[in-house]
């Protein structure tokens, strides 16, 4: 097998064809702050994606400042708090990078409040007109480009409304829920279309709809509220680019909905958390229809394994999930401060050692 360019390697892998070697990345392409300091100290570098030559790079919309009316709704915030384009307030927590949310729609009681709430203006050209040039620059380097809609519908909705409130709305306040998730979906469809027009190779979608013992909501509730809207976002991209690859992320055990994710057009499942989903079993069941991205545990192997155990896990993933293509190796979540540097080095060394396919 001849050596592939990085982009060729990713596209072959995600189309379930065997590449020259297994591609890799870190979640979001970086570390938590404490590990970033160690990375800088150990390598003298600033960018893990460049240092380890990740084959995929993200492109994103440029989000505007929050509307003044949103700041009025939130009221006074503690020192150090920030507010994003959606009006979601984040307040520094007491541990590393963890933050607390301030939900701008937490006190809403009517659908009218959902209708009147100012969502970010993403249709304005300054939000998206840079995308084509950024994608072209990545392609000129033979890198794969990925459009980021990582927190797609459910998560952005509950960040705005509060999780308990939104799930309650799904059950007993359907008019309020419909207005909010439909407005979010319409924006996400516009973004998906613009990403496809810009030429991204992969559209990254995701919502954490499961935890380690199963779904956060019943499959029936997911089927009613999220599945058709997610399908609309995928369809909006595929009208423009029928061959665009669609990535879906949910932490936890989402096996109950995997066949339906495939049905609506998902090509890539992430992170395939091994603490609650067996990656080899997922490959046996769905490897003819899905590629898998992640699979190396951040609750087990990364923080608590030895370098030898890390190498054994990577070798096992290549031999099982990677057989015939369909595996991009990555941690299943952003790496936390307790992860030993030696395990990070072992992860990449093991991919170099075991992830090369025979000619």
Image (tube, grey):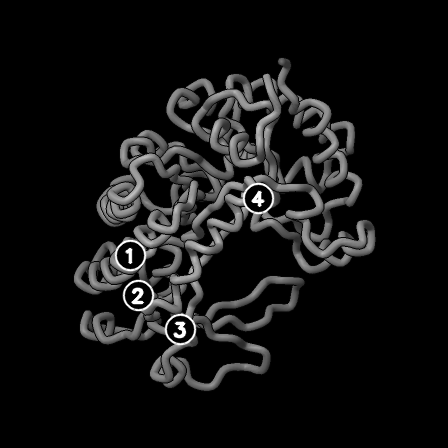
Residue at 21% across, 71% down: 115
| Disc 4: CA contacts within 10 A as few (<14), some (14-19) or many (>=20) | few
Q: What is the C-alpha distance between the residues marked 4 and 2?
A: 29 Å
Dot 1 or dot 4, earlier in sequence = 4
Q: Is residue 312 positioned above or below 162 on the image?
A: above
Residue at 24% across, 47% down: 232
Q: How many marks?
A: 4
Name the residue tied to disc 2.
123
Name the residue tied to disc 4.
141
Say the numbered circle drawn on residue 133: none
Quick one: 326 or 76, which is closer to the camera? 326
Q: Provide the secondary structure element on which disc 2 rests.
A: loop
Q: Provide the secondary structure element on which disc 4 rests.
A: loop
Say the numbered circle drawn on residue 190: 1
Dot 2 or dot 1, earlier in sequence = 2
Dot 2 or dot 3, earlier in sequence = 3
Q: Quadrant of residue 344?
A: top right
- Res 205 seen here: yes
């Amino acid at each position: 097998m001849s050596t592939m360019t990085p982009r060729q390697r990713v596209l072959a892998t995600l189309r379930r064809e065997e590449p020259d070697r297994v591609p890799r990345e870190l979640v979001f392409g970086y570390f938590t702050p404490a590990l970033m300091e160690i990375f800088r100290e150990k390598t003298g570098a600033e960018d893990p994606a460049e240092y380890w030559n990740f084959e995929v790079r993200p492109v994103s919309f440029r989000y505007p400042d929050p509307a003044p009316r949103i700041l009025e709704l939130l009221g006074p915030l503690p020192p150090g708090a920030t507010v994003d384009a959606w009006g979601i307030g984040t307040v520094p927590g007491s541990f590393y990078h963890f933050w607390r949310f301030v939900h701008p729609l937490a006190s809403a009681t009517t659908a009218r409040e959902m209708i009147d709430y100012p969502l970010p203006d993403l249709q304005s050209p300054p939000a998206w007109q840079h995308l084509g040039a950024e994608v072209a620059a990545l392609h000129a380097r033979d890198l794969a480009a990925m459009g980021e809609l990582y927190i797609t519908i459910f998560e952005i909705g509950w960040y705005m409304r509060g999780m308990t409130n939104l799930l309650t709305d799904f059950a007993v306040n359907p008019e309020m829920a419909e207005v909010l998730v439909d407005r979010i979906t319409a924006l996400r469809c516009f973004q998906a279309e613009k990403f496809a027009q810009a030429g991204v190779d992969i559209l990254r979608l995701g919502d954490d709809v499961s935890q380690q013992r199963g779904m956060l909501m019943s499959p029936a509730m997911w089927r009613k509220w999220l599945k058709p809207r997610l399908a609309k976002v995928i369809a909006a991209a595929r009208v423009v680019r029928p061959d665009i690859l669609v990535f879906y992320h949910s932490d936890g055990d989402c096996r109950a909905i995997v066949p339906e994710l495939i049905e609506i057009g998902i090509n890539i499942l992430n992170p395939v958390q091994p603490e609650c989903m067996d990656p080899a079993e997922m490959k046996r069941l769905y490897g003819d229809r899905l590629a898998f991205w992640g699979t190396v545990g951040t609750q087990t192997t990364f923080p608590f394994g030895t370098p030898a155990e890390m190498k054994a896990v990577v070798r096992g993933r290549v031999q099982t999930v990677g057989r015939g293509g369909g595996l991009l190796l990555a941690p299943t979540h952003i790496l936390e401060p307790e992860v030993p540097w030696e395990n990070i080095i072992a992860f990449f060394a093991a991919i170099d050692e075991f992830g090369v396919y025979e000619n």
